[in-house]
Each structure stands twice: as structure tokens, then as C-alpha cells.
Image (cartoon, grey):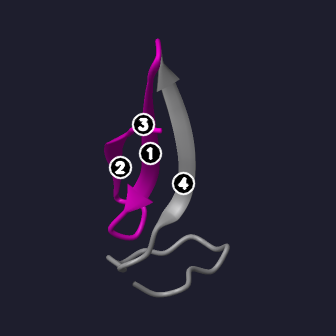
């Protein structure tokens, strides 16, 4: 994993970009851009 820059990328990179927490009625998820902003990842978070 590498440090990401605040600019868009047009190729797959191994970076955690634009992370955000999403609450779905009591279930919390971490959402982030993946593969150079060409997809999204969603993972459940337990506190």
C-alpha cells in the first residue's frame, strides 16, 4: 500500500482512497475507492 495523492488516477493502484463510514440502520460499513478509483470496496465494521 502506498500513500495516495489528492488527484484522480487513471490506472490501478494499491491505495486506500476516499474512505467513508456508512451507517445502514445500525450496521456500519467502511466504503472506499479501489483500483485507481475504478471500483468500490465495502466492508462491515464492528465497534
Kind of element beneath mark 2: strand
Magenta portion: prevailing SS class:
strand
Q: Which portion, as a residue range, is magenta?
A: 25-47
Q: CA distance from mark 2 to mark 3?
A: 12 Å
Task: Using the image, tell me which numbered label, if any, was put on residue 19.
Answer: 4
Q: CA distance from mark 1 to mark 3?
A: 6 Å
Q: Are marks 2 and 4 in contact (CB under 8 Å)?
A: no
Is 22 placed above or below 41 here? above
Kind of element beneath mark 3: strand
Question: Which of disc 3 and disc 4 is earlier in sequence?
Answer: 4
Residue under label 3: 29
Q: Nearer the viewer, mark 2 or mark 3?
A: 3
Residue under label 2: 40
Question: Which of disc 4 and disc 2 is earlier in sequence?
Answer: 4
Left or right of 35 in this view: 20: right
Residue 10 falls within the magenta-colored stretch? no
Amino acid at each position: 500500500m502506498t500513500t495516495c495523492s489528492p488527484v484522480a488516477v487513471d490506472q490501478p493502484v494499491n491505495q486506500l482512497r476516499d474512505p467513508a463510514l456508512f451507517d445502514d440502520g445500525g450496521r456500519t460499513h467502511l466504503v472506499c475507492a479501489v483500483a485507481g478509483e475504478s471500483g468500490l470496496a465495502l466492508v462491515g465494521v464492528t465497534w
